[in-house]
Amino acid sequence: MNVENGSAMTGSVLIKLDVTSPQLRKTLEDVVKARPEGPARLSNGSATPHLLIMELDAARPEHTFARVQALRKSAPHVDVCLTAERLDTEVLIGAVRHGVKEFLPQPITRDVLDQAVQRYQERAAGAFPEQPIKKGKLMTVLGAKGGLGASSVAVGLGTSLQMSEDRKSVVLVDLNPQDPDLALLLDLDPTHVFQDIAKDLSRLDTLFLMNILSKHPSGMYLLPRDGREAATSELIPECVERTLRMLQQLFDYVIVDCGHVLDPCTTTALDLSPSILLVSSLHVPAIRSTKALLGRLQGIGIGGEKIRLVMTRYDANVDGVLKNAEEVLHHKVFWLLPNDFEAATSAVNSGQPVATVAPRSNISQSYHRLADSFSEGARKDKTSMLGGCVNFVKNKWAKDKPALAS
């Protein structure tokens, strides 16, 4: 590959080492030299490499990221591989956001390097062309902590969008790294999962992707995730990005359940999404977690208008709590989902969307109104939308109160 103009690679992959540890350098040199002639060779001069293997400065990761950024500006076609003895979640997120393409765990074996070189060759050959976003609206759902119902919000919103707009298509994507439950909530037994795409990204096209998806009787589609630890580790940010971009070519709405954990894959989805539904509740532990998460998101450059707070289990009879929460969080609440325990529990236990098992319930109606806020005719005034949402919950509560009391 001619690195200067980005043309297709015709020769061997030129690898340059940027490491300070003599032992690591010797190991890498031995691994590269042990490969067959042709596919890869070490750079011994000033030529711009195809792959740069950079050792993380564990004491100063931000120093490493600054060097990566500078390199990407001067030589944008160079793929940077980061290696370290240990890569924690925050470091991985920072690395992805600064353009690192590969993570090479130590000790680096010939198999690990072979796979990195192969993935680089596929990228250089144009195996993964950029997919321009044409129409699909991408929304991510992120829980402030576990147990707040982020997955239920993804299902409820997706179902209501599917029901409310004729001839509109919806796909749910389970990216939850700890408890991927969308298939369970929809009572589906999928044949394929997200990790099947990651096994061979070169196969990713629209036909292959549609064969991976599962279809729900409502008409929604699902890209499920295997929650087993061995399978979970196979997903990489590049796979997530290219899959989501391709889904946007196929569906009108793409809703991603990110669970409540920030990792490189969920952060990639949040970066791509114009709308992040941050799910919380008006309880002290949840508010505390929400404030901390908002700070973390701001720290990695995700924030502002794209984050929309959705409060679950809202009780309209508790005065002042909503205003106090907004003051603590320094963030306006976008939507309130009423505390409808019976309908929500029935939906979870039956493996069906709440709009199916309790179509006239308060929470089903709230999901329909939430879906309307994202439709093509949605109102732009978020304050008025929240006001309508609060009034709706209060009116329904007042109307149903005598029946509940009896």
Image: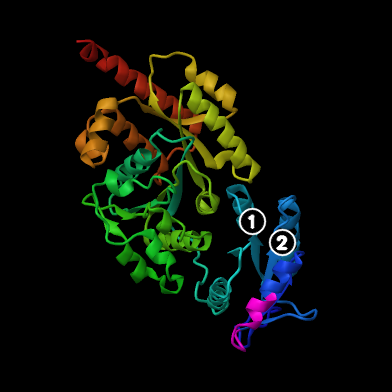
Q: Residue at x 63, y 62 (%)?
A: 100
**What is the three-letter code of the residue carrying label 1?**
Ala
Which residue is label 2 attached to?
A: 68
Q: Position of residue 398 (x, y in %)?
A: 30, 14
Q: Position of residue 231 (x, y in %)?
A: 40, 58
**In terms of secondary structure, where does tag 1 sit?**
helix
**What is the three-letter code of the residue carrying label 2?**
Val
Which residue is label 1 attached to?
A: 95
Nearer-N-terminus badge (2/1): 2
Depth order, front residue of 388/277: 277
Vertical side of 400 occupied by 18: above or below: below
Crowd rating for badge 2 (residues with CA inside 10 Å; few <14, some 14–19, many 20+):
many
- Which residue of the protein is positioned furthest toward the right in this rendering? 46
Q: CA distance from mark 2 to mark 1?
A: 9 Å
Q: Is residue 403 visible?
A: yes
Residue segment shown in magenta: 29-39
Q: Position of residue 53 (x, y in %)?
A: 68, 69
Left or right side of 328 for 19: right
